[in-house]
Amino acid sequence: MITTYIAMHMGIRTKEKPFQCRQCAKSLTFNSNLTHHMRVHTGEKPYQCSQCDKAFIHNSDLTKHMVIHLRKMDTMGKPYKCIQCSKTFTNNSDLIKHIRIHSGEKPYRSSQCDTAFSYNNSFTRHMRIHSGEKSYQCRECGKGFSNNSNLTIHMKIHTGEKPYQCSQCDMAFSYNSILEIHQRIHTGEKPYNCRQCDKAFTHKSNLTEHMKIHTEEKPYQCSYCDKVFTLKSHLKRHTRIHTGERPYQCSYCDKVFSLISNLKRHTRIHTGTKPYQCSECGKTFAANSSLTEHMRIHTGEKPYQCSQCDKAFTQTSNLTKHMRIHTGEKPYHCRQCDKAFTQNGQLKRHTRIHIGEKTYQ
């Protein structure tokens, strides 16, 4: 026994750390420390409070927690009082931390950047961004996270939990932040405004993407052709034209799509969801683009102008059809004879002559 304690003591003096974690490669001096550390990865909390449902990884944390139950919840039980707001605390250290809310003091400063923090735990989490340390690992897929809270959020992907329900439609979400963004579809709120033009966006990321239009920056080059793109995500989508990749599978049928936005639109055929509502007449649509086109009925807007004559159109497809009058283009060819047509509908009507179909009797 004495030999064991001597060995442990010598480990402290020599700074030897022979016990290594298999999950994150962290080394520790004692096996008992390794046992405690492993609970970070496993989520095990063996120390249960007898007064409430809380549980803890370390016995010392439970001991600190028990003070809450043992002391009376009054100023005698919480002798440390804030002179700014009269809030009371069990420990002087907690009062010192609280005072920073009023003083704005941020004593914990990152050596890698200029960010400063009021609390050591916030500072520790931030430093993992620089070190790349990801101590919290998902048991399902092995993905690592720097914060336990991020791991908790991530786990909803595997459990399928969607506790946040939209009050306007049947859609539900794993995160409250995504629900808030979704609700802007119903409210029409676009809080992110471009300073260069009058455009506004529901997502901050969309505004960031839009700003590159003004800078004309296109750093992403296609390796298959000469096209360049403002955003890496646009390049990734474009590359699927060359590779034929369609990673997004419909859960209702066998159809696959190259874009997740196309999958979402397609899924509404099965679900019947129409989240986009006209504010003028109440008509609903499955796609936002359909609502935009519909609104032109009410506004009278015709943004697609013919370059050959004065005609204008509400939809670009109608302008394309119209331009064939000027160009003489007839892209729809009959397989039975040499005739060609400007519109697909004209070809379909013509084909009935060959098959002998009599639609109107």
Image (cartoon, rainbow, N blue to C red):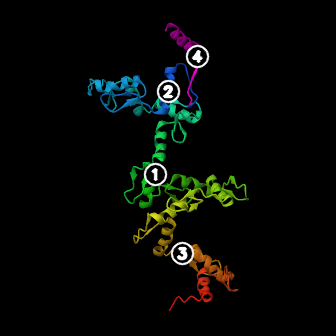
Q: Mark 1 sits on what residue?
A: 178
Front residue of 192 and 85: 192
Q: Is residue 354 left or right of residue 102?
A: right
- How far is the residue under mark 1 from the one under mark 4? 47 Å
Distance from the alpha carbon under mark 3 to that under mark 2 = 64 Å
Location of residue 161 in the rendering, given as x and y in whole percent from the top left corner: 43, 48
Q: Nearer the viewer, residue 167 or 353?
A: 353
Q: How many other residues sit within 10 Å of disc 1, few (<14), some (14-19) or many (≥20)? A: few
Q: Is residue 293 inside the magenta stretch?
A: no
Could you classify mark 3 by the number of other residues whose Cα lies within 10 Å: few (under 14), some (14-19), or many (20 or more)?
A: some
State if disc 4 and disc 1 touch (CB < 8 Å).
no
Residue at position x 54%, y 42% from top? 141
**Label 3 or label 2, whichever comes before in sequence order:** 2
Along the line of sight, which residue is nearer the eye, 303 or 285? 285
Label 3: which residue? 314
Which callout, 3 or 4, points at the residue further toward the start of the chain?
4
Q: Is residue 226 above or below residue 81?
A: below
Which residue does the numbered mark 4 point to in the structure image?
Answer: 15
The magenta-colored residue range is 1-22
For residue 37, which numbered disc appears in the image? 2
Query: Where residue 139 is drawn, which disc sits there?
Result: none
